[in-house]
Image: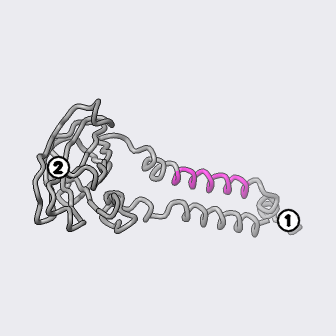
């Protein structure tokens, strides 16, 4: 009986560790290439978006989930060298639709020989859409980034709270089964059956 409980506990622990792998909740800084949620490919062109709030965290960069309201520095790296010679603009709209949302910032088209498009904007709580475009609309469809500012990310909450809670409940259940087992009762009474 004790082997079965040990085997079940080991399997449950392995399953729990597989589900709660720390790389699954790694910060954006560890992502690269295809795994990077801030990198967008449109045709053969690449752009990379980052948001910074140095007043809260000096070195942290964000892409889709911005933890605080306030002044935010937006940086677009024009990874594709061809984009550095074309006028590129950035528009930030409060909401999920450019046509229906409130315009928050409009960074006018200009060339960026250094490959970096910069802007600063104050973001309040809510959803925002960042729209990037070139003057040659047919060459680059508009890559959009949806920003969630100071909002609860329920998927992240599930990973950080629910999975460890599930592990505690599983250990409690295994402990209960062990306490109720015949083997433990026989061991307590001194019986060797």
Instruction: Check the image and name the residue furthest to the right.
Output: 193
Is residue 137 magenta-colored? no
Q: Report which quarter residue 101 is drawn in.
A: top left
Classed neighbour count for the residue bearing mark 2: other residues with Cα under 10 Å, few (<14), some (14–19), many (≥20): some
Label 1: which secondary element: loop
Position of 71 with respect to 169 (left or right) is: left
- Residue 152 is situated, as x and y percent measured from the top left of the image, at 37, 41
Q: Tell me the residue that label 1 is attached to.
A: 191
Quarter of the image where the C terminus is located: bottom right
- Residue 180 is situated, as x and y percent measured from the top left of the image, at 76, 53
Number of marks drawn: 2
| In the image, residue 123 above or below residue 171 | above
- Residue 11 is situated, as x and y percent measured from the top left of the image, at 66, 66
Quarter of the image where the N terminus is located: bottom right
Q: Tell me the residue that label 2 is attached to.
A: 89
Q: Nearer the viewer, residue 184 or 164?
A: 164
Is residue 172 magenta-colored? yes
Q: Residue at x 15, y 40 (%)?
A: 105
Residue numbers of the magenta segment: 163-179
Q: Nearer the viewer, residue 13 or 193?
A: 13
Task: Tell me which secondary structure the magenta stretch mostly adopts.
Answer: helix
Q: Nearer the viewer, residue 78 or 74?
A: 78
Classed neighbour count for the residue bearing mark 1: other residues with Cα under 10 Å, few (<14), some (14–19), many (≥20): few
Label 2: which secondary element: strand
Q: Residue at x 26, y 36 (%)?
A: 125
The answer for how far apart the CA atoms under marks 1 and 2 are is: 81 Å
Ranked by sequence position, the earlier of labels 1 and 2 is: 2
Position of 162 with respect to 96 (left or right) is: right
Q: Report which quarter residue 114 is drawn in.
A: bottom left
Q: Residue at x 63, y 54 (%)?
A: 170
- Residue 63 is situated, as x and y percent measured from the top left of the image, at 29, 53
Q: Residue at x 67, y 52 (%)?
A: 173
């Amino acid at each position: 009986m004790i082997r079965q409980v040990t085997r079940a506990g080991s399997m449950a622990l392995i399953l729990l560790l597989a589900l709660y792998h720390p790389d699954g909740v790694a910060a954006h800084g560890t992502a690269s290439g295809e795994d990077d949620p801030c990198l967008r490919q449109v045709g053969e062109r690449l752009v990379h978006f980052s948001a910074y709030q140095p007043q809260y965290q000096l070195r942290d960069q964000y892409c889709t989930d911005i933890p605080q309201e306030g002044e935010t520095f937006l940086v677009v790296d024009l990874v594709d060298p061809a984009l550095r010679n074309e006028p590129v603009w950035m528009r930030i709209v409060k909401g999920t639709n450019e046509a229906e949302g409130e315009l928050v910032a409009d960074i006018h088209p200009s060339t960026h020989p250094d490959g970096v498009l910069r802007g600063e904007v104050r973001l309040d709580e809510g959803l925002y859409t960042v729209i990037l475009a070139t003057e040659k609309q047919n060459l680059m469809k508009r890559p959009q980034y949806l920003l969630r500012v100071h909002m609860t990310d329920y998927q992240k909450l599930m990973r950080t709270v629910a999975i460890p809670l599930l592990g505690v409940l599983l250990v409690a259940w295994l402990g209960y089964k062990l306490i109720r087992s015949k083997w433990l009762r026989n061991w307590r009474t001194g019986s060797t059956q």
